[in-house]
Amino acid sequence: MADSRVIADQLLIGLGGAENIIDVEKCMTRLRVGVRDQDRVDVAALRAIAGVLAALPGDNCQIVLGPGLVDRVAIDVESALSAARAEGSAASSAAQLADKGAAIRQQNKQRNNTPVKNALRRISNIFVPLIPALIACGLIAGINGILTNLATSGQVPWLATLSPIFSVMSSGFFALLAVFVAMNAAKEFGGTPIIGGVIGGIIVAPAVANIVVWGQQLAPGQGGVLGAMAAAILGAYVERWARRWAPDVLALFIVPTLTVLIAGLAALFLLMPAAGWVSIQIGIGATWLLSTAGVFAGFVLGGLFLPLVMTGLHQTLTPIHTTLIEQVGYTTLLPVLAMGGAGQIGAAIAVFFRLRRNTSIGRTIKSALPAGFLGVGEPLIYGVTLPLGRPFITACIGGAFGGAVIGLFDQLGYTVGAIAIGASDVSLFPLLQGSQGWGAAALGYACGLIVAYTVGFFATWFFGFTRDQLVRLNTDDTIDAGLVPADDVPEGADDPADQIPTLAGSHHRS
């Protein structure tokens, strides 16, 4: 296991010291480090650190470490920063540094402070913390399905006693999913999480079945996570409004009561019916799309998924996946989108063999491939395909053809779905389900993977590099040789969303 403290210390040196670091944020696979002076960042030294899969310079320098390791390194970096700043406080004014850092941080936030980006970021913040639980309960549900099949077939009848136990462990979270979504939504929008949970609890309460609204009888859980999220967001605004005028001595009684009353009534009489209708339309739309235009829809969705991951927009699909799972028991979109990662694996393997002499790229691919096979694509995106340019495009092509295969199965009536989200590639197999059962879904998914791997590999092998690039890159430690010089970087291009390669060459604005 990599020593996270050693990596943290080396990162501080490569990033120009603690005084050059504004703030540190982490996502599932990488650190985002705000820096004051880009000239002080030694990108080559960062990339040379054992455990670092890729380093992308910019005002928000991104260090790709992979899942698990990024959590430990983030803690150690924060600890090292605190220690370093404490030691340097005697030599410099902490207040001045804080003011300067706050000013730079504010400039960075203003640059990315657009309504669309903020909305997408907030939706992502609501659902990303739930992904580990979704994976765990989904896998347990998959195990329970196997146990149930073995028991009902008569092969291992004693397993019937275990099935109810696994069923409770897997279904408990999904039964209260609206509550957890509401808690996260309230927190994200400035409300109290527990009050958000109370509002979410209204939506899933069994007594909802006794309420008739606009001539229609409500059903517990109607509107699902969409209704819970909308109600909790409304509750957060009501809570903040009430806190502004409620007297301090009465705030404890007025604020939560008023919040639950207003948001609860809105949820029952407006949001649940509306969100229920939207949820039904999502299910109908997704089913229609893949059943009538499966091949074309799969081609487009599979080919576009890597750019969505690159920009972080893939997290905004989580409510759609969750809605489909609530409606039909599985999401048909996730297996199609997972083909993007499979195409990238094929592309990365082709890069490995095409650039056999490049030890830097080879080391990165060998480190990132295991995570890729388990469904974590960011290390390969930021460490291999995106910096090289063309391989990113050929990886998308592989994903498109894989998605077309999954779409073909859907169009023929053998739907391929997933009963939980968060996993992809080979790790998705235990979570597969479809209209014809697990076997047919697994066959369709396996065919899609094989096609995506194969097309991604051969598209990259034949079209991933020009002759000049092969000569320039196929030597020791020359990944930077294929990149645009630093002087050509457009001002403000510090986010992966601004670093889209083109088919014209392997140029990547890093």
Image: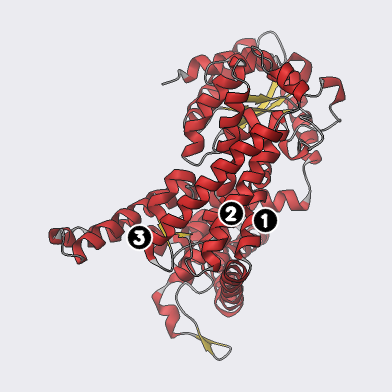
Residue holding disc 2:
403
The amino acid beneath tag 1 is Val
| Disc 1: CA contacts within 10 A as few (<14), some (14-19) or many (>=20) | many
Q: CA distance from mark 1 to mark 3?
A: 35 Å
Q: Give 229 or 502, whichever is nearer the viewer.
A: 502
Residue 388 sits above or below residue 346 on the image: above
Residue 334 sits above or below residue 477 on the image: below
Q: CA distance from mark 2 to mark 3?
A: 32 Å
Residue holding disc 3:
172
State if disc 1 and disc 2 touch (CB < 8 Å): yes
Q: Reading the chain from its start, which is encountered first: label 2 or label 1? A: 1
| Figure quadrant of residue 456 | top right
The amino acid beneath tag 3 is Gly
Q: Reading the chain from its start, which is encountered first: label 2 or label 3? A: 3
User: Horizontal and vertical percent for residue 446?
Assistant: 46, 50
Q: Reading the chain from its start, which is encountered first: label 1 or label 3? A: 3
Q: Taking the image as drawn, is residue 427 in sight? A: yes
Q: Secondary structure at mark 3?
A: helix
Residue holding disc 1:
300
The amino acid beneath tag 2 is Gly
